[in-house]
Structures are given as C-alpha cells and as structure tokens.
Amino acid sequence: IITLSDLECDYINARSCCSKLNKWVVPELIGHAVVTVLMLISLHWFIFLLNLPVATWNIYRYIMVPSGNMGVFDPTEIHNRGQLKSHMKEAMIKLGFHLLCFFMYLYRLVSKIVPK
C-alpha cells in the first residue's frame, strides 16, 4: 500500500515501484497456498473456505499476466485504465483480509491454550 501510494504521489517511478511489488508476488502466492492447504489438511473448514477465494485469486492473477509484461505489476500499464486505483483497492482488501485472519488465528490459539 505504501509503495503504491508513493507511486501515486510521484515519490518513486513506476519501474522501481513495480520491481519492488513483483518480487513479493510469488512468495505471497506460495505462502497463501500453503496456509490454505494446511487448513484443508487440519480440517478447519471455515478458515479453509475463507482462504480459498483469496488463494484462487492470487493464482489467477499470476497466471493471467500477459506475455511481455514485467509481472503482475507492469510499469508501462500501471497508469493506464485505472490500474493503479484497482491495485490500491486490492491491496486494501487484502490488508483487511489478513487482519481478519490474524485475529481469527489468535483467537483460535488462545482458545486452545486457555482451559475452560
């Protein structure tokens, strides 16, 4: 979010912004896929079903990168067709999702540790 807002305010150029963001796309994809599979294996159905659409979206977004682009975030197209706004919106939604998941995991951890 900070990198995209820096690009929006012209504090950094599009090429450096996109290279910073693209280096985190694959680790995010792998991490989210691993968490989703672990929730399936451990039979936490609600958390699995909550994570599945986000993991699917990350995989879809990575697969649908047009050939010739630098990655999911492309410096030649980020200012075209409102992509910067859509990337900002997606980042805010993911931030909210990850905050929700953090508190759900924390509650689950505490409820397992503290006896009733």
Image (cartoon, rainbow, N blue to C red):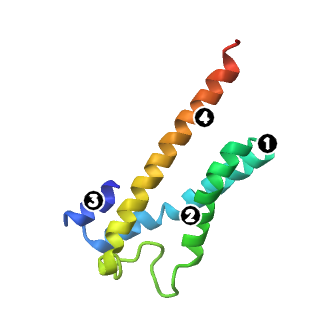
Report the residue at 48% width, 87% height from top. 68
Q: Is residue 100 left or right of residue 10?
A: right
**In this figure, which residue is indicated by the disc labeled 1?**
43
- Image coords of residue 70 (percent x, y): 45, 79
Nearest to the observer: residue 24 or residue 58 = 58
Task: Estimate the x, y position of residue 24 in percent, counting from the top left.
Answer: 49, 60
Viewer-nearest of discs 3 and 2:
3
Q: Which residue is mark 2?
A: 26
Q: Quadrant of the N terminus?
A: bottom left
Distance of mark 2 from mark 1, alpha carbons?
26 Å
Other-residue count near label 2 (Cα within 10 Å), few / some / many at <14 / 14–19 / ≥20: some
Q: Quadrant of residue 112?
A: top right
Q: Which residue is mark 4?
A: 105
- Confirm or deny contact between disc 3 and disc 1 (CB under 8 A): no
Pick whichever of labels 4 and 3 is earlier in the sequence. Answer: 3
Query: Could you tell me the amino acid type at mark 4?
Result: Tyr
Mark 3 or 1, nearer chain start: 3
| For marks 1 and 4 on the same chain, the one whose residue lies earlier in the sequence | 1
Cβ atoms at labels 3 and 2 below 8 Å apart = no
Callout 2, which amino acid? Val
Mark 4, residues whose alpha carbon is within 10 Å: few (<14), some, or many (≥20)? few
Which numbered disc, 4 or 3, marks the residue closer to the eye?
Answer: 4
Residues at discs 2 and 4 in contact (Cβ within 8 Å): no
Q: Which mark is residue 88?
A: none
The reply, left or right, for residue 2 in relation to residue 67 is left
Q: Residue at x 43, y 61 (%)?
A: 90
Q: In the image, what residue occupies the spot 52% across and 79% down?
A: 65
User: What's under tag 3, amino acid-wise?
Assistant: Ser
The answer to which of marks 2 and 1 sits earlier in the sequence is 2
Q: Which residue is mark 3?
A: 5
Residue 102 image position (x, y, % from top left): 54, 38
